[in-house]
Image: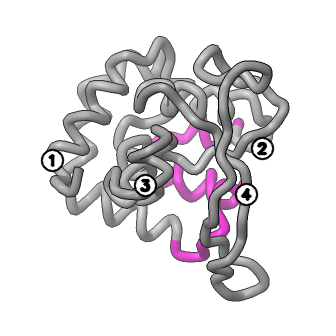
Amino acid sequence: MADKQEFIRQMVEAIRQQPDFHGLFPSVMIAQAALESGWGESGLSKKYNNYFGVKASAVRFSSAWDPKVDRSVNLRTSEYLDGGWNESYRDNFRVYRSMSDSLRDRNAMLSRAPRYAAALKAATPDEQIRLMWEAGYATDPDYVGKIVSIINANGLRQYDKIWSVKKNG
């Protein structure tokens, strides 16, 4: 899915299927999925429909993944640890049935974690991603800049305007 516009189209469709945005901006959801899945080209997204790198655990966040029933997969991942990138880090990741399930589960995870409460009340996408990062969402020290850059370069703020009513209640 190397075509960015096709990836955006598919993410927009997955967002439309969400029963609740949990206060997340669509532009942030799309940009995070784009960055974290390499625009849908990572093995984790292509083979396992996990577009956000959600790790497997015994916790059920939504109906999209149940630790007692659904699969997980152990894969190598890159993590920024102790001031540098560790390319040989391995972890267990959730396997989803669809892009929409990946989005639903990740968004539910964020809504249930008290550390993201301020981010989910943010007034702008830029503030939201900064607050998510400050709460520990990603290890990459350049994460906020990368997400904002993807939002701006791809005109993703237009989706925030379309769904502002859904986001705000």
Residue 119 in magenta stretch: yes
- x and y percentages locating residue 11 in the rendered image: 31, 35
Mark identifier at residue 37: 3
Q: Amino acid at mark 4?
A: Asp
Left or right? Give the position of 3 relative to 131: left
**How is the structure coloured here?**
one colour
Given the current orientation, which residue lies at the most extreme right position?
58
Q: Nearer the viewer, residue 81 or 155?
A: 81
Q: Nearer the viewer, residue 44 or 149?
A: 44
Q: CA distance from mark 4 to mark 3?
A: 16 Å
Secondary element under disc 1, as helix, strand or loop, is helix
Mark identifier at residue 91: 4
Q: Which residue is mark 1?
A: 5
Q: Is residue 61 above or below residue 119?
A: above
Secondary element under disc 4, as helix, strand or loop, is strand
Magenta residues span: 117-142
Q: Is residue 34 above or below residue 85?
A: above
- x and y percentages locating residue 135 in the rendered image: 72, 54
Label 3: how many residues lie within 10 Å, few (<14), some (14-19) or many (20+)?
many
Between disc 2 and disc 4, whose residue precedes? 4
Left or right? Give the position of 158 relative to 126: left
Determine the residue positioned at 47% across, 57% down. 36
Between disc 2 and disc 3, whose residue precedes? 3
Secondary element under disc 2, as helix, strand or loop, is helix
Q: Amino acid at mark 2?
A: Arg
Mark identifier at residue 61: none
Q: Amino acid at mark 1?
A: Gln
Q: CA distance from mark 2 to mark 4?
A: 22 Å
* Quarter of image, res 56: top right
Query: Which mark lies nearer to you, 4 or 3?
Result: 4
Q: CA distance from mark 2 to mark 3?
A: 24 Å
Q: Which residue is mark 2?
A: 115
